[in-house]
Image (cartoon, rainbow, N blue to C red):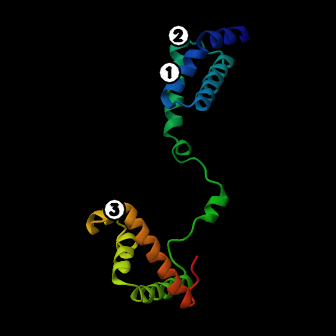
Amino acid sequence: MEKEFEKLYAAHGRAVWAVAYARGLNAEAANDVLQETYLRLWRKMLKGSVIRQARAWLIRVARNLAEDFARSSFQKNGTISPEIFDSIGSKIIAPDSNLVNSELKIQIRNGLLEISPTDREILSMRYALDFPVSEIAQSLGLLPSAVHMRLSRARTKLADILKNMGVEVP
């Protein structure tokens, strides 16, 4: 029986692996399917079952196992370590964080009122409206390099004003 098993493995092992690999393009999964396929063959042989068309039977089993593996939730979702779950924050903002954010927004608004309207406009376009620099340059009739320079100067002015207000600026 062992010699027959080894003979079948030598004759059809590569074809079985190729069928499994073609399904998922994953060599490790194909090796797992190959091993499981031949384990099932071994169990059938131990029970005394006769398999007439061994190659067709092996390929059918491998194809079914590869399909099952591809459909499994483990394959689709994988596993996630507990540390990653611990690092995932809640969608609900804690009340103290919410209060800090609200106060910071008020201080930034007050700081924006103290800079020039042109600086306020360019900062608003970039950070409040999330316009790309190229779009800001086009709408203001400037070169992108000039927009970058104005943004840099406006940020520096706003940061100085916020520091004078006692706001911690990173």
Residue tagged by mark 1?
A: 60
Q: Is residue 2 left or right of residue 25?
A: right
Gap in angstroms between the C-alphas marked 1 and 2: 11 Å
The quadrant where residue 115 appears: bottom left
Earlier along the polypeptide chain: callout 3 or callout 2? Answer: 2
Residue type at mark 1 is Arg
User: Secondary structure under badge 1?
Assistant: helix
Residue tagged by mark 3?
A: 143
The quadrant where residue 140 appears: bottom left
Residue type at mark 3 is Leu
Residue tagged by mark 2?
A: 53
Q: Is residue 113 left or right of residue 63?
A: left
Residue placed at 55% from the left, 90% from the top? 164
Q: Is residue 125 left or right of residue 80?
A: left
Residue 166, given in percent of the width and then of the height, sits at 57, 90
Residue 76, given in percent of the width and then of the height, sits at 51, 44
Figure label count: 3
Q: Toward the viewer: 48 or 95? A: 95
Earlier along the polypeptide chain: callout 1 or callout 2? Answer: 2
Q: Which numbered dot is residue 89?
A: none
Q: Mark 3: give few (<14), some (14-19) or many (20+) Cα within 10 Å.
A: few
Earlier along the polypeptide chain: callout 1 or callout 3? Answer: 1
Q: Toward the viewer: 167 or 61? A: 167
Gap in angstroms between the C-alphas marked 3 and 2: 74 Å
- If the image is split into quadrants, where does the C terminus sit? bottom right
Q: Toward the viewer: 37 or 103? A: 103
User: Secondary structure under badge 2?
Assistant: loop
Q: In the rendered view, would you say 162 is above or below 1?
A: below
Instruction: State yes or no: discs 1 and 2 in contact (Cβ < 8 Å).
Output: no
Residue 52, given in percent of the width and then of the height, sits at 54, 9
Q: In the rendered view, would you say 137 is above or below 166?
A: above
